[in-house]
Amino acid sequence: MATKSQPRVRVPATAKAGEIVEIKTLISHEMESGQRKDGDGKPIPRKIIHAFEASFNGKVFFAATWYPSVSANPYQSFFYKATETGEFKFTWKDDDGSEYAATAKMTVA
Amino acid sequence: MTMTSAGITRRQAIGSAAIAVFAAALAPRLALADEAAVAAELKKLYADKPMTEGRIKLDVPQIAENGLVVPLNIDVESPMTAADHVKAVHVFADGNPLPQILTYRFTPESGKASASIRMRLAQTQTIICVAEMSDGRLYSAKAGVKVTIGGCGG
């Protein structure tokens, strides 16, 4: 499977100062565990997204390290305490060196 | 005489071949982690620092019909202030090929130490979660999941 990994992110567009908002992310990826064997009995090499990071206005507030036990098309939800208007940046790092990114703006009233 | 001994040899040969086939059938398809593997990973992270049970709400289904996508929700009780917050959360499984599932790093900006993901479980096993607070205290929680169809399959 060689489909391009497409990230999807859901963040609220607006929030009140001090509000804790939920962020939901999803990225298409096969997360090949490295434990499976192909038809000839040869092991299929591992290829997973191993690192995820979320930042707001350039400051990292949540990070995750994933191992092969994370399901295909990894879904990750977490929280952020809104204080100011700005932009989220999310990055996913693949074993093959590729990086996928998504951004989202949030206005704090 | 020679005939008989040849016969016994053949029978023995057949017998040991059957044992070999039986042993191969019994051998697990995957080398799986166990409680000792999880303990070894924890020792690498925190040496032999004491852990207290509690503070962590580890939400997993009691029975997972599909081991390929098992929902996991973690919620650690904490004020999440600069002085007192959850720094890291590690999740382990004692029956998967690798004992580690994931590590989270939280900050006071996270607002709460809570996250959800979906994981693969190869078989019925115990999920172990350890949370490290900003002052170094460690908390742990465990939950068993019954898996009807395994993930991580070969």
Image (cartoon, grey):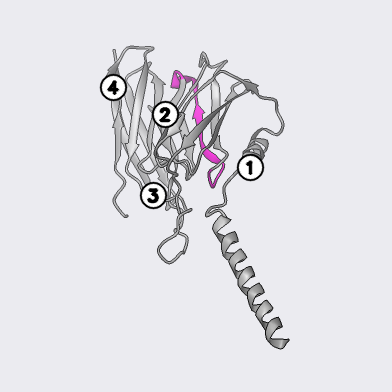
The residue mark sitting in front, 1 or 4, is 1
Task: Give the answer, above or below, for where A72 lies relative to B8.
Answer: above
Q: Which residue is mark 2?
A: B116
Q: Amino acid at mark 4?
A: Pro
> Residues at badges 2 and 1 in contact (C-beta under 8 Å)?
no
The spot of residue B4 in percent (x, y) is 69, 82
The answer to whether residue A35 is seen in the rendering is yes
Q: CA distance from mark 4 to mark 2?
A: 18 Å
Is disc 4 surrounded by few (<14), some (14 to 19) or many (20+) residues within 10 Å? few
Q: Secondary structure at mark 4?
A: loop
Q: Name the residue: 35% across, 32% down.
A: A89
Q: Residue furthest left?
A: A13
Viewer-nearest residue: B3 or B20: B3
Q: Which residue is mark 1?
A: B37
Task: Locate the C terminus of chain A and report the quarter of the image it occupies.
Answer: top left
Q: Which residues are magenta?
A: B96-112
Is disc 3 surrounded by few (<14), some (14 to 19) or many (20+) residues within 10 Å? few
Q: Name the residue: 66% across, 73% down.
A: B12
The residue mark sitting in front, 2 or 1, is 1
Q: Is residue B98 magenta?
A: yes
Viewer-nearest residue: B64 or A101: B64
Q: Which residue is mark 3?
A: A98
